[in-house]
Each structure stands twice: as structure tokens, then as C-alpha cells.
Image (tube, rainbow, N blue to C red):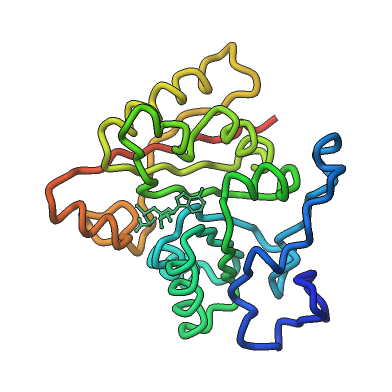
Amino acid sequence: MSFGLGHGRSLDDAPGVVGISRAELPPLPDAALSDPNAGRLDPRTWFHHPTRPFEIEIGCGKGTYILAEAAANPTINFLAIEWAREFYLYAADRVRRRALPNVRVLHADASEFLQWRCPDAIVRTIHLYYSDPWPKSRHHKNRVVQDAFLTHVWRVLIPGGQLRLVTDHPDLWVWYQSHIARWSAPTHAPRFDLLPFTPPDWTDDDELVGTNYERKTRAAGRPPNACVLQKPLP
Ligand SMILES: C[S@@+](CC[C@H](N)C(=O)[O-])C[C@H]1O[C@@H](n2cnc3c(N)ncnc32)[C@H](O)[C@@H]1O
């Protein structure tokens, strides 16, 4: 059975099933410049059970969150996207060792993946935890959360779907809040509802998402801020 990864590969061809490299994605066609749908593919087909709920983690680092969340929710499919090659390889290796059939790890820029590859209304939740703060003003353009990013988040989420945000960086939190204020205003179209963040059941009492970064930042005494943006139901 082919899962659209190219090279006639199947899910039984281990290793190399869990991790998906950039080279395994089909080339982005020139037509994508005039037709946004031309480059889209359906990442749900990379899983054994493609019709199950589908979630994405952006910047999974070493994969601690996705491992715990996927083990706790075996009937949900999780795609972890990581652009740093060493972390992508590390996280994919951990997924393989844990033999989690409901996780794939993609080596890519998550913002580009959402923009060019991800079809409309297929994602239940997007997890973005401890994203790089890019503190210098001239680097703010590198932050993951941007208006264009939120446009694509809104597009790829199913109605009722959520973007979950956690950061320990005060300036990045201010950046999030200014975007959220606009995107949750009654006059903004499209818009999100702003909800409180609830940690998963499996986290410890003082944790929000239990990632490597969170454990380090807690130890350093930097409390995180968190919230949820929800695409409204029709
Ligand atoms: C500060 S680390 C946090 C990692 C993990 N979420 C945690 O809490 O331990 C941020 C991660 O996001 C990754 N990253 C940043 N921007 C990205 C992007 N546009 N697409 C994919 N990964 C990205 C970085 O390579 C890094 O591994």
C-alpha cells in the first residue's frame, strides 16, 4: 500500500516511515503561485488510519511533548514538524523506539508547510510550545506567529479547531497578545475565539506541556504564559 511518500515506499518499509524528509515531498509546482491548491497534499494519508483526528505540533524539538501526547491518545494522528535537522532526526528516532504508529515527524518549515502544502479544514489542533522568541526587532519577522501564519492556521483548522500557544518569553507573549487582540476582535474576519489553556492530564502539577524546554525554563524561574485560539463553529 502506498502512502504518497514517493519511491513506492509503504508503512512496512522500516526504517524511514516515521521521519519524512523534505526530499520526499513532491516538488512544489510552479502553478502554486497562481493556484494555491496546486501544491497541496494530504498528510493524513501518511498514517495507518487516515480518517482519525489529525493534529500538528510546530517545532517539536526533541519530541517530548508529541511522545507523551500520542501515547495518551492512540486514536489521534500527530504530525510533528521540526526544521532543525538534528532535532528532527532525534525526535523521529524516539518515535521509532517507542513504536508509536500514530506519529510522523516532518523535516520542514512549518509555516511554509501550512501555507503551500496543507489543505483546508483538516487539522483539529496545532500545538506551538516555546517557539523561538527572536528578541531583536529586526528578527521579529522570523517569529512563527505572524498575520500570514494565522491566516493559514485558520484555513487549515476544522471548525472548532484550536491553536494552542505557550511561551516563557515576556516580549513574545506581548507579540502574541497584540495579534490575538486583533484576531479575536468582533470585527475581524476571519476571527478566533480566545480560550484559557488547559494542560493535558498526563502533565505534572507545575507543568503546562512538560517539554524539555519547559523543564529548563521552570528551573530557571521563568513562568510561562499560555492561551488557546479557537476557530469558531459555524
Ligand atoms: C525553543 S525550541 C522548543 C522545542 C519544544 N517545543 C520544547 O518546548 O522543548 C523551538 C523549536 O522550534 C523549531 N522551529 C522554529 N521555527 C520553526 C519552523 N518554522 N518550523 C519548524 N520548526 C521550527 C526550532 O528548531 C526548535 O527546535
> Residue 55, image x and y in percent?
58, 56
Tally of numbered discs: 0
Nearer-the-camera pick, 9 or 138: 138
Residue 200 pos. (x, y %): 39, 56
Q: Answer with the quarter of the image where residue 46 lies.
A: bottom right
Which residue is at the far front?
Answer: 138
Q: Quadrant of the N terminus?
A: bottom right
**Residue 35 vs residue 159: left or right?**
right
The vertical placement of 145 against 181, above or below, is below
Q: Quadrant of residue 69?
A: bottom left
At a point 46% along the width and 83% down the height, the residue shown is 98
* Residue occupying the point 63% across, 35% down: 154
Q: Is residue 134 above or below residue 51?
A: above
User: Quadrant where the C terminus lies?
Assistant: top right
Q: Quadrant of residue 231?
A: top right
Q: Is residue 188 above or below residue 11?
A: above
Q: Is residue 99 above or below residue 115?
A: below
Residue 61 appears at what percent x and percent y?
41, 61
Q: Position of residue 191 (x, y in %)?
A: 59, 24
- Residue at 71% across / 71% down in the picture? 49
Give left or right: position of 177 versus 147. Answer: left
